[in-house]
Image: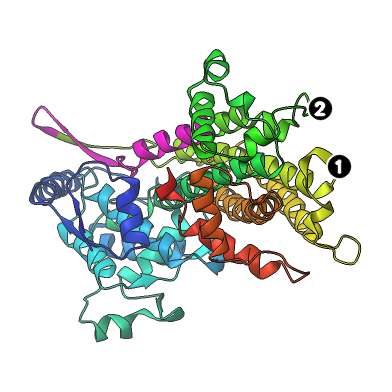
Amino acid sequence: MHTVTLDGSPLTTSQVIAVARGGAQVAVADAALEAMIQSRRHLEAIAGDGLPHYGVNTGFGSLSRHRVDDDHLKELQVNLIRSHASGIGEPLDAEVVRGMMLILAASLSRGLSGVRVELVQTILEFLNKNITPVVPAVGSVGASGDLAPLAHLALALIGEGEVLIDGRAVATRPVLDSLSVQPIRLEAKEGLALINGTHLMAAQASLAVNDADRLVRAALIAGAMSIDGCRASDSYLNKNVAEARRHAGVSDTASMLSLLLEGSEILPSHRENDPRVQDPYSLRCQAPVFGAVLGGIGYVRASLEQELGAVTDNPLVIAEGGKAELVSAGNFHGMPIALPLDHLATSISHIAGMAERRIFFMLSGHDPESGLSPYLATRPGLTSGLMITQYTAAACCNEIIGLATPATPANVSTSAGIEDYNSFGPRSAAKARRAIELAEHVVAIELLCASEAIEHHRPLKTGDKLEQAHALIRGRVARLEDDRPPAPDIEALARLIREDAFAPLF
């Protein structure tokens, strides 16, 4: 297990995944420590000038005109954390919270937030000792930072709230005592720095992009397998045709599908005397549709990479020309990552939607040239085969349609109108992740049906890579000999997707 070192440079998605899911350790580079020390010195000098400074010696949001005495600055920060911990709903998964903590620590370690080194070290001690705060999922509007979720995270850092132990929520302080971890005592501005950022959205986006990559690989396998399962053509994967579209994603998709089908014995078996002129769009238009999806995911990935290098605190300590000032701005606003997350849900909808159409086509029995029995049943009528799996896929797609409705355009004002335009990016993130989860099951159903369809063409084989994929599927799901509940098979193949078992084929 490698160590992720915070050195001021942007995090990578793989680093977030390593910490969030893999339990990798985290450290801070000396250069980042020095940057934080210098930033804290600047902040303390600014705080001592007798002037009001937002978040240091004033209230927050619409209370920013209320000045706070120096004797109460530490109390101000603790009160901020306690009052903002207003989340509701089921707790976020531990992987999301760990991702939040890493991205928060990375942002603070870039030396613009004015926090002490001890604060970042406490966050890393929680990560490295696998202490995960309990963070309710609902409460952030994705603008003045992910306030409520991050406040619940910060509660644990100060020894309050709850943490997860073996999947159970328990009081924080006894856990810290048992592990010899000292809760942090907040100094000026540090409470605000803990909650004023896009760290929930960025963590969710990191996990979503990673999961989308795995889904894409499985969906390409399923789509290619369906071509042979339906005894369809591969003419629409012609390289010159793809290049004529002038879209990199289209060319890439056509190339990958062609590679997966390479060596197929099924394709040439029906080239002569096949009365069909063109296949349905769900087969024939895979390259343009899937290519557009790849472009959409690429846009999300590029936006995430920027976010993982950002400082999203407010205000920031800016030092130029030997002079430092505390600048209030809006880097906490989530729109730069919220809008891409809305787009991600839409992109995922087309992976699931097209897969469902191919499932329908395979199971319909409408095309006598496909060589497939209705519903892939062994004894149609007496047995129903995989009939109802299409219903399940349709139900998943229906939910995804709702999830593809963007969250960002619907504004609701907060903080007495001072915070009057919010991103609602956490909802964009939750929708995108749920859409991916549902799409995994739709693709799993396509894999189930397409692998069964290929059995109908034996002894002919599909492409070499697809035969390897078929073997992976058969390692989890037996051939359909008679009716049985498909639910366990669908779940087994969804797990195969989540394990990224098809990655070696690319």
| Image position of 497 with respect to 224: above or below | below
Asked if residue 285 lies left or right of residue 273, the reply is left
What's the magenta region?
A: 294-323
Which residue type does callout 1 highlight? His
Quadrant showing the N terminus: bottom left
The quadrant in which residue 344 appears is top right
Residue 186 visible here: no
Q: Position of residue 188 (x, y in %)?
A: 24, 56
Q: Residues within 10 Å of mark 1 (few under 14, many from 20)?
A: few
- The residue drawn where x is 30% and y is 42% is 311
Q: Position of residue 126 (x, y in %)?
A: 27, 69
Which residue type does callout 2 highlight? Pro
Residue denoted by label 1:
366
Asked if residue 398 lies left or right of residue 303, the reply is right
Residue 275 is tagged as 2
| Image position of 478 with respect to 60: above or below | below
Q: Position of residue 452 (x, y in %)?
A: 68, 55
